[in-house]
Image (spheres, rainbow, N blue to C red):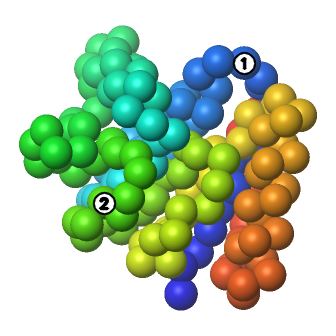
Amino acid sequence: MTEVTFYLSSKAGDGVRQALAWRIADKALKQGRQVYVHCQNEAHARQVDAQFWQSPATGFLPHALGGEGQAPILLGFGDDPGHHHDVLINLTDQVPDFSSRFQRVAEMISGAETERQKGRERFRFYRDRGFPVTTHELG
């Protein structure tokens, strides 16, 4: 069964969810996992792409935009990625239809109240369907 973890930040503002995604993707990569980062749209995927090239300041996370190569971390949007990945990092405001194909789903939630409310809706969705759900406060 897919395990779902919500990562909560008290910080609000642009880029908070992307920064959380970077941390979780880096951790999953170090564990030898394949990661799919699900973005809102192409423009959002390109923003995340730029951040993953620049973080940390001393390096980058090996990744590719969907359809632009192979890497342990794939950034995409829209439909099912069609590849086998272990971890789904969801940066959208909805639960992707294909989320149950992954071993783990990571939901990034910033401190902005509108994002918290959308996160609560996703939490209820997973919980009501019997997914094991945990939360982690990241400050």
- CA gap between label 1 and label 2 equals 28 Å
Q: Which mark is residue 13?
A: 1
- Residue 63: x and y, percent? 24, 38
Q: Tell me the kind of residue under disc 1.
A: Gly
The answer to whether mark 1 and mark 2 are in CB contact below 8 A is no
**63 sits left or right of 124 in the view:** left
Label 2 CA crowd tier, 10 Å (few <14, some 14–19, many 20+):
some
- The outermost residue toward the left is 69
Quadrant in the picture for the C terminus? top right
Q: Does residue 52 appear in this view? A: no
Instruction: Name the residue: 84% across, 56% down.
Output: 120
> What element does badge 2 sit on?
loop
Q: Residue 92 in the image: x percent, y percent?
A: 58, 45
Place residue 91 in its image quadrant.
top right
Residue at (69, 79) in percent of width and height? 132
Locate residue 37 relative to residue 132 in the image: left or right: left
Q: Residue at x 87, y 46 (%)?
A: 117
Identify which residue, 123 or 8, lies in the foreground: 123
What amino acid is labelled 2 in the image? Pro
Where 63 falls versus 50 (above or below)?
A: below
Q: Horizontal and vertical percent for residue 14?
A: 65, 18
Q: Which dot marks residue 87?
A: none
User: Sequence order check: which comes first, mark 1 or mark 2?
Assistant: 1
Image quadrant of residue 48?
A: top left
SS for tag 1?
Answer: loop
Residue 126 in the figure: left or right of residue 87 = right
- Residue position marked by numbered label 2 in the rendering: 81
Up-down relation of residue 62 to residue 103 (above or below): above
Please determine whether, in this image, residue 119 is positioned above or below residue 80: above
Whether residue 80 can be seen here: yes
Q: Residue at x 38, y 58 (%)?
A: 79
Q: Which mark's residue is nearer the viewer, 1 or 2?
A: 2
